[in-house]
Image: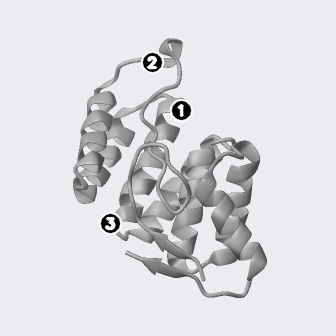
């Protein structure tokens, strides 16, 4: 049996959350009123105030116009909503992030975590496999997949 814990740190393995800290390159960086909301959301995540983080990321989505920034904010919203056990909202945000960027391994891994929390283990496996194909260096994803492949009918337990 695999035991998964909810934790939040920047760029970590599956069964943990992946937070997008910003736009990848300087030429992609632009400033909108939403950027301040993203910053405040990130600060709330670090303070483990997930309700406030969710509010800030939702505000940022209303103010952010660029699709690349929007995909990053959606991923962070997924992580915040997951942490506050708003799983349907988390799944919706992750799905939107993945639709906007099919190569976003963070959103795929976060979606896998949401599916695990919902008891949807085969869907979690699919998301984790996609994340693993994009970034094969996520130790937590590898652990989940190895355990799932070893015992596919096992009921997994989440420790909160």
Q: Residue furthest top?
A: 27
Q: Residue at x 51, y 18 (%)?
A: 28
x then y, percent, for residue 131:
68, 51
Decide if residue 111 is on the left or right side of residue 40.
right
* Mark nearer the viewer, 1 or 3: 3
Label 3 crowding class (10 Å Cα cut-off): few <14, some 14-19, many 20+?
A: some
Checking the image for residue 29, the label placed there is: 2
* Mark nearer the viewer, 1 or 2: 2
- Distance from disc 1 to disc 2, alpha carbons, whole Å, reads 12 Å
Task: Name which quarter of the figure residue 134 lies in.
Answer: top right
Sequence-earlier tag: 1 or 2: 2
The mark total stands at 3
- Distance from disc 3 to disc 2, alpha carbons, whole Å, reads 29 Å
Q: Residue at x 56, y 58 (%)?
A: 14
Q: Secondary structure at mark 1?
A: helix
Q: Which residue is mark 3?
A: 84
Sequence-earlier tag: 3 or 2: 2
Q: Which residue is mark 1?
A: 67
Decide: is 27 above or below 48.
Answer: above
């Amino acid at each position: 049996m695999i035991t998964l814990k909810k934790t939040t740190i920047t760029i970590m393995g599956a069964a943990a959350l992946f937070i997008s800290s910003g736009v990848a390159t300087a030429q992609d960086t632009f400033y909108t009123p939403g950027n301040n909301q993203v910053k405040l959301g990130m600060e709330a995540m670090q303070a483990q105030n997930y309700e406030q983080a969710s509010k800030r990321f939702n505000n940022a989505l209303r103010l952010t116009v660029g699709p690349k920034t929007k995909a990053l904010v959606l991923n962070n919203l997924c992580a915040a909503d997951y942490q506050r056990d708003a799983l349907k909202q988390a799944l919706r945000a992750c799905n939107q992030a993945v639709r906007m960027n099919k190569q976003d391994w963070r959103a795929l891994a976060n979606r896998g975590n949401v599916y695990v929390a919902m008891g949807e283990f085969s869907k979690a496996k699919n998301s984790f496999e996609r994340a693993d194909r994009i970034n094969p260096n996520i130790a937590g994803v590898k652990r989940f997949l190895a355990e799932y492949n070893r015992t596919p009918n096992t009921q997994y337990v989440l420790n909160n």
